[in-house]
Every structure is written in C-alpha cells, then in structure tokens.
Amino acid sequence: MSVNVNTVYSRVLAILNKEQRGFLTPQEFNLFANQAQMDLFEQYFYDVNQFGRMHGNDTEYSDMLNILNEKIAAFATEATPSQTGGYFVLPSNFYRLGTVL
C-alpha cells in the first residue's frame, strides 16, 4: 500500500498547527483518525510477531496469537497477480504479503 505524498503533507500540517487551541476541523479529524487506524493495524503485525515467539495458550478465547490472527483475517484476501513483461502486478489494495504458493 503506497502512501500519497499529499496525505503525508496534510498530516504534517495538521500536527504542526498548534495555534488552534484544541479546535479540529472535520478534515483534520479524518486525517488523524486514518493515521490512528493505520497505526493500530500495523501494530497487529508487530504483535503477531511477538506473540508468535511465546508459548501458546490452550484456552479458546484468551490465546493472543489467535485473537490477533482473527483481527487480521478480516482484511486478508487471496489473489492471483497478473504477469506483465516478466513482472507481477500487485493489486491496488495490497498491503502485506502473507503466503506465496
């Protein structure tokens, strides 16, 4: 998933705008909400890596690795990339590669 330069620029401007004294426009709120969602989503992958190194839990609803994999599974898809000129073109909604078969 690529990041639009304009999105990064808008977020930096919103963060640097300290003179508003707590006022947040709807556009700035959406920028921060999007950033927070992406931070949480990225944290899932880091946590899967960390909990994957620890011994698992035998209980059905408290195994953190299982819980995190369920959260990520909502976004997981299977796709067959198309080949163009010796290269494979990734889908537009691609974020991370899980398994290659």
Image (cartoon, helix red, strand yellow):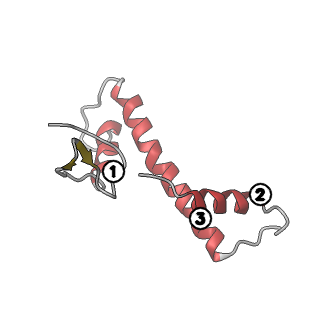
Q: Which residue is mark 1?
A: 71
Q: Position of residue 59 (x, y in %)?
A: 25, 37
Q: Residue flagged by tag 3: what amino acid is it? A: Leu
Q: Position of residue 10 (x, y in %)?
A: 65, 63
Residue ID at (65%, 59%): 9
Q: Which residue is mark 2?
A: 16
Relative to 97, is 17 above or below?
A: below
Residue ID at (41%, 52%): 1
Task: Classify 10 Å Cα crowding around label 3: few (below 14), some (14-19), many (20 and above).
Answer: some
Q: Camera-side residue: 99 or 47? A: 99
Task: Classify 10 Å Cα crowding around label 1: few (below 14), some (14-19), many (20 and above).
Answer: few
Q: Tell me the CA gap for discs 1 and 3.
A: 23 Å
Q: Nearer the viewer, mark 1 or mark 2?
A: 2
Relative to 35, is 86 above or below?
A: above
Q: Camera-side residue: 52 or 26? A: 26
**Among the two numbered marks 3 and 2 on one chain, the one whose residue lies closer to the N terminus:** 2
Element type where label 3 sits in the image:
helix
Q: Quadrant of residue 17?
A: bottom right
Which residue is situated farthest in the front direction here?
85
Q: Residue flagged by tag 2: what amino acid is it? A: Leu
Q: Residue flagged by tag 1: what amino acid is it? A: Lys
Q: Which residue is mark 3?
A: 31
Numbered marks: total: 3
Element type where label 2 sits in the image:
helix
